[in-house]
Structure formats: structure tokens, C-alpha cells
Image (cartoon, rainbow, N blue to C red):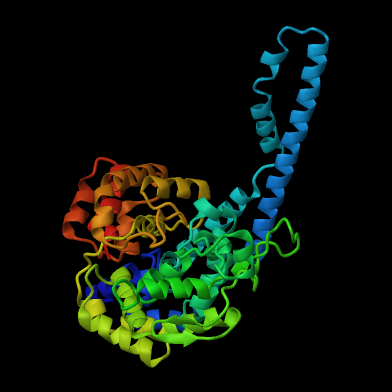
Amino acid sequence: MTSSAKAEAALALHRFGMGPRPGSVAAIASDPRGALLAELENPPAYPAAASALPSSGKAFRAVNDANARRQAKAKMAQREDDAKKKQMAAAGAMMAEDAGQNAGEMAEKAAAEAVPDPGRQFYRDEVKLRIEAALAAEIGFSERLVWFWSNHFCISADKIQSMSGAYEREAIRPYVLGRFVDMLLAVEGHPAMLFYLDNTISMGANSIAGINRNRGLDENLARETLELHTLGVRSGYTQDDVISFANVLTGWTWLPPGDNPEHGGEFLFNPRLHEPGPQKVMNKVYDQEDVEQGRAVLRDLAAHPATATHIATKLARAFIADTPPPALVESMTKVFLDTGGDLKEVAKAMVSSPDSWTLPATKLKRPSEWVVSMVRSCGITQVDPGRFVAGQALLGERLWRPPFPKGYADDEATWVDGMGRRLDVANNFAERVAGTVDPRYVIEDVLGSCVSPEVTQAVARAESRQQALTLLFMSADLQRR
């Protein structure tokens, strides 16, 4: 096997996958591009354990039910305490008031301990499967695509923790190698997105509910769909388009769990919230009177040339370079338009472009991608989800918790100032694995000796295994793609 073959295989694993793991460089060295294309045709299945996880609606109902039971227990405890205070007062106890002043807080604490929040465990279980899928993948190209699209169509677990993992499984994973329009429809109609961007409280001013409640429109979902999810900024839409589209999306909501214990938290089109009449969006009039009005707008947005350019640019930036070659973006845009938004074909176009293989590996990996590539290089396939989440928080990329609807940035300027924190994480991880992981094995067998001579020398001169591994983990050979 030639060094050039190993180098191209390592590049494929870093640039398109989750990073080399034991045996992966040798496994694809004969045809790295063919291996990537083969994975697109036959992506690895998500862990079977996912079938035991609750749907987003079921998870939401479980959390809502726990909250209700917790509140009831707290109120019952408060009532009992009030009764005791009255008895003490009747008996002339001087300290009755002091004894009960913190009763409310104590009751809430006792209720929380008696009825734990199931949403935390749902989140932990989802994290564990997601990370282990990335660690176990031979290449990880399709998994990287899941991560890309989950960030593109992000929600936040800070607002709806119970649904965060299920949302990715239901609205993202099934569509990453399908048609963009299908993913768009799944995402914008998912209860997690509707709640995250406040569409569950949006109602047309002239709708039945809007008139009766004297409430009106929320523009968040419409604006972010146009600006972030489809067309992109400065792509021709106006504020009037945002308002009209927001009216189109009124009625897209969910079933309140308190009112429906079997289907609460699931999607519902409520005509009482929907603004009546036709709406004009991007110079086209949509006169449908129900949920199909919104779906018609989304289908047209998915097919718009600006959407094709926006998506192609973001994909190329995420995988290839902060400033991707214009020719690469143009070719991916053309494939998007020619195939009706076939995301598998767009990914193939990216892999098949010479630009994707000739550009130097200078793009800085996002913290999550770097951590996974570091762990993979040591052959580890099982993780403690709590430790992983804590590490991601330290590095500024909390899982499923982006600070804004645009998701986490994908450029070096955003992450380069965090290299000091990466050093802390690398050193801590190196300390834990130094007893079982030989840095020379990682360099020669896992990375296929595709590291710089300077790094090889630094590792050889290190005073300890821990120091050697830390140097390797912090090197550009693992930090960049």
C-alpha cells in the first residue's frame, strides 16, 4: 500500500467521515472515493436500541405527566403543612410561623425527588446512541450528514429537552439521503420545531381564535424558514413575504398533552387558528384553505434556485473549506436543481469533485467532530453520555442546544479561541486512556502514518504516554480536515 493511497484514505475519513478508527484507513485505501459513494448507497443502520426509545410525542407526554404529578404532590404536601401550622397555632406554639416559612420550597423539593424528570433520561439515552453510532461507523459519512442537517434545522433542548433526540430521529435521519423537500416538510411540521419557533402560539388576526382571544401572529417560524432553512439571507424575499408566510403557517400547532393523554404533543392543523383567505408569498398567490397551503409554499421554497445555492454552499463549507471553491458550489447547486433536490446526488457531486480532494486539510473541525475523531482514533466505541455532554459544554458546543436558530457556526473564527479548552479535554482524555493506548500504534496503524514529521518527532520525544497522546490529539492532523 503506497503512502499516497493511505493519505487519500485518511483525508476521506477526516474530511467526509468521523475520522480514522483502527483498520479504517487500510479498509478503504484501495478506493477511498468509491468507499464514500458506496456508503451513500448503503448507509449503516442506526443502532437497533433506538426502536426502544419513545417517539417525540410519547416523550413529551411522559414529561408533561411527570410535571403534573410533581405539582400535585407539592400542593398536597403544602396542604398538609398548612394543616400542621394551624394545629400548632391553635396549641399556642410560638414558633409556628418560623417552622413553616420554608414549607413551600421543601414541598417542591420533595415532590421533585419523588417524581424525577423523565426528559433527562430520554436525552441521555438519545445522546448515547448518537455518539456510539458515530464511534462505530466504518467511515461515518452518512452520520456526518445527519449532524450537518440536524444543525441546519436545529432546535434547542433548552426549550424542549424531551423531544430533542426524537426530533433528529424522526425529521432528519430518514431524509438525509432523500429529497430536500421531504426533509423540509418533516422538519417544519414537527412539533419540536413548531414549539421551538413559537408557531404553537401563532394565530391569524382574522381567524376564529385570533378574534376571540385578541391575539395574533408570530413570525419566527416563517422568518427562519426563509432566512435559514431555505432561501438564505438577501435572496429576494421581503418583510411582506415573511408576514404572508407566517399567516400561511397559522394553524400548524400541536395537541395539548393535558387535553389529549394519548396524542398530546403530536402535530395538529387547527383551522380555528388559521388566517382565512389567499396569501401571496414570493410573487405567487396560494389560495388553499387548509394545511396544504403551507405545504405548497414549502414545496416551492425547496425548488427555488436560491435554496439550491444556499444548501450547496453550506454543505461545501461544512465538509471542504470555510470558503469553498465557487466551481464546487456551482456544480453541487446544478445537481440540486437538476435532480429536484436529491440530497444523495448532491453529496455524490461533492465527493466526485476534484476540488474536494486537492484542497489542503486546513478546515478546523467543530468541537464535537474533533472529540469523536479523537475517541475513534483510540478504538473506543462506548462512551459515558454524561461525560460527553459535559465535555461539549466546556468546548462551547452543547449538544442539541445551539444559542440561536441558525445553529452552530462552521468556520474557524468561531472555534479557534477555544483551543485552550480543547487542550484541557485532550489532556484529560489522554490521562484516562494512556494505560491502554499506545500513541505509536495510533500514528502508524490507525492514522496510517499520515501525520506530519514534526508531530511524529514530538510524540517520540514526549516524557510520558499521556503527554504523547495529548500532543497527537492536539495536532493539526486530528484537529483539521
Q: Nearer the viewer, residue 359 or 121?
A: 121
| Residue 84 position in % (x across, y down) | 80, 20
Residue positioned most to the bottom: 338
Looking at the rendered image, the quarter that the N terminus falls into is: bottom left
Quarter of the rendering containing residue 153: bottom left
Quarter of the rendering containing residue 233: bottom left
Q: Does 48 sit left or right of 469 as displayed?
A: right
Q: Residue at x 24, y 77 (%)?
A: 357
| Residue 400 position in % (x across, y down) | 47, 57
| Residue 25 position in % (x across, y down) | 35, 70
Looking at the rendered image, the quarter that the C terminus falls into is: bottom left
71, above or below 230, in the image: above
Q: Nearer the viewer, residue 234 or 62?
A: 234
Q: Nearer the viewer, residue 474 or 326?
A: 326
Q: Does 278 sit left or right of 410 as displayed?
A: right
Q: Residue at x 23, y 67 (%)?
A: 361
402, above or below 283, in the image: above
217, above or below 94, in the image: below
